[in-house]
Image: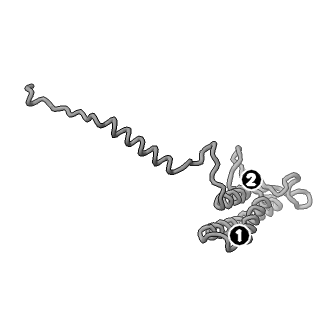
């Protein structure tokens, strides 16, 4: 191969400076974003977080989460309490919320109330089926009350 046919190699000596500049630009962008909540950091304590916390408690009481054995726990009283707290929050903050906050709260309350009614009806039907001796239903106590020690909770396998 002659010198004329040999490929020419172009060495870009600026690549290190360009890489460093890009690294600095990305670091600056990250610093401007501020810290993101992680395992050690808490999310901001704001209205949306408060509504989310109470809504999460209500959803948990409505059987939204399963335990280690895959069973669903329904706690209607606990769920109703969380929903009622959200209602109190809506009433006491009326006129003091932004349009977006008020809309979010209304939507969350509407959805939770609707689900509460659905789950309460399903629990009542299951309890009635238990009285009728339907297999898999929770049997009532001696006077038709929920099983002893069950309190307001129902375990659904």
Residue 127, picture quadrant? bottom right
Q: Position of residue 65 (x, y in %)?
A: 68, 52
Q: Nearer the viewer, mark 2 or mark 1?
A: 1
Tag shown at residue 121: none
Residue, x 38% and y 43% (percent of image)?
Answer: 22
Q: What residue sits 83% from the left and 56% below the top?
A: 139
Q: x, y (%) of residue 77? A: 80, 61
Residue 90 image-quadrant placement: bottom right
Mark 1, other Cα within 10 Å: few <14 / some 14–19 / many ≥20 = few
Residue assigned mark 2:
73
User: What is the x, y in percent for residue 125?
Assistant: 76, 64
Q: Nearer the viewer, residue 144 or 58?
A: 58
Disc on the earlier residue, 2 or 1? 2
Q: Quadrant of residue 62?
A: bottom right
CB under 8 Å between callouts 2 and 1?
Answer: no
- Label 1: which secondary element: loop
Residue beneath the point at 9% across and 27% down: 3
* Mark 2 Cα shell of 10 Å, populated few (<14), some (14-19), many (≥20): some
Coloration mode? one colour
Q: Secondary structure at mark 2?
A: strand
In this rendering, the count of numbered labels is 2
- Cα distance, mark 2 to mark 1? 32 Å
Identify whether 75 is placed above or below 101: above
Name the residue tied to disc 1: 93
Residue 44 versus residue 25 in the image, above or below: below
């Amino acid at each position: 191969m002659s010198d004329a046919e040999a490929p020419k190699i172009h060495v870009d000596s600026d690549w290190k400076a360009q890489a460093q500049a890009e690294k600095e630009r990305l670091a600056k962008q990250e610093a401007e974003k501020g810290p993101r909540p992680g395992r050690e950091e808490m999310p901001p304590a704001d209205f949306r977080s408060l509504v989310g916390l109470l809504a999460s408690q209500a959803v948990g009481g409505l059987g939204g989460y399963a335990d280690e054995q895959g069973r669903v726990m329904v706690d209607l009283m606990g769920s109703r309490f969380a929903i009622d707290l959200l209602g109190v929050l809506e009433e006491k903050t009326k006129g003091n919320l932004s349009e977006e906050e008020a809309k979010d709260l209304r939507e969350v309350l509407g959805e939770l109330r609707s689900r509460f009614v659905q789950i309460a009806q399903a629990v009542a039907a299951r309890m009635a089926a238990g009285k009728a001796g339907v297999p898999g239903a929770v049997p009532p106590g001696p006077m038709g009350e929920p099983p002893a020690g069950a309190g307001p909770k129902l375990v659904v396998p």
